[in-house]
Image (tube, helix red, strand yellow):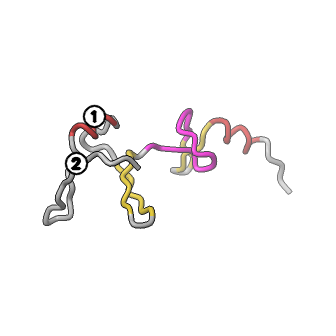
Amino acid sequence: MKSTGIIRRVDELGRVVIPIEIRNQFDIVEKDPIEIYVDGSSIVLKKFESNCIFCGNNQNLLSYHDKLICTDCADKIGTLEKK
């Protein structure tokens, strides 16, 4: 991980402001969803991107029962044989 040298304090509600330079770098705008991960002793923030539940692809997504599936995986599922 690369240090930015930027330090922010957590406010009384547990909020931390992401500096504008970092928001611009990652194309984060107001109301964008952010995922929070824990990696050992680190907290990682990541801009949320919708992905296929099977392969992780984030392009050509279809919605099926509120789940996202890419067209490639949908085609593969269509060729499965029942046992």
Q: Verify whether residue 58 appears in magenta.
A: yes
* First of labels 2, 1 by sequence position: 2
Amino acid type of the residue that numbered disc 1 sits on in the rendered structure: Asn
**Residue 40 to residue 54: above or below:** below
Q: Indicate left or right for 23 with 11 as reference.
A: right
Can you identify the residue that label 2 sits on?
A: 6
Label 1, on which residue? 24
Q: Residue at x 17, y 64 (%)?
A: 13
* Prevailing secondary structure of the magenta residues: loop
Task: Say which element carries label 2.
Answer: loop
Q: Which mark is residue 80?
A: none
Q: Write down the quadrant of residue 23 in the picture.
A: top left
Q: Residue at (20%, 53%) from the top-left corner?
A: 7
Q: Of the residues shown, which amino acid type is indicated by label 2? A: Ile
Magenta stretch bounds:
49-62
Q: Quadrant of residue 75?
A: top right
